[in-house]
Amino acid sequence: MEKKLKQLFDYQKFEGNSDLQLIIDSVHARYGVRELGMDEMEFVSAAGTPDALKKKEQEKKNP
C-alpha cells in the first residue's frame, strides 16, 4: 500500500509539468513566499476544520 501511494504522489512526475509550474508561479506572485509563524500554524489543517478555528466559532455562538 505504501509503495502504491509513493508511486501516485511522487513529485518527480509533476516537477517538469509546465502547466503546474504556471499555477505555482501565479500563486507565489499573488501571495508571496514566506514561512508561517507559530500563531498561523495552529490554523493549518490537512483535512477538516482545525480545532482552534472550531473553538473560536463556538465562542462566537456562545459568548
Image (cartoon, rainbow, N blue to C red):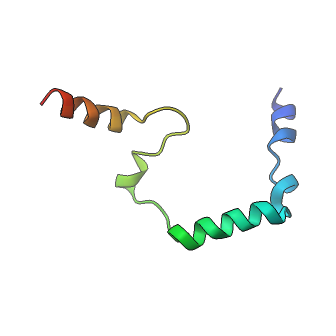
Quadrant position of the N terminus in the picture? top right
Front residue of 23/33: it is 23
What percent of the width, then of the height, locates residue 40? 39, 53
In the picture, measured across the screen, residue 63 lies left or right of residue 41, that is left
Quadrant position of the C terminus in the picture? top left
Q: Residue at x 86, y 64 (%)?
A: 16
Q: Residue at x 81, y 31 (%)?
A: 2
What percent of the width, then of the height, locates residue 25? 67, 70
Rendered image quadrant of residue 23: bottom right
Q: Residue at x 33, y 38 (%)?
A: 52
Looking at the image, the residue that sits furthest to the left is 63
What percent of the width, then of the height, locates residue 11? 80, 53
Question: Is residue 28 visible in the rendered structure shown here?
Answer: yes
Q: Is residue 43 above or below residue 5?
A: below
Question: Is residue 33 visible in the rendered structure shown here?
Answer: no
In the picture, measured across the screen, residue 8 lies left or right of residue 47, that is right
Rendered image quadrant of residue 42: top left
- Count numbered badges in the picture: 0
Rendered image quadrant of residue 61: top left
Q: Is residue 40 above or below residue 24?
A: above
In the picture, measured across the screen, residue 9 lies left or right of residue 60, that is right
Q: Residue at x 49, y 64 (%)?
A: 35
What percent of the width, then of the height, locates residue 26? 63, 69
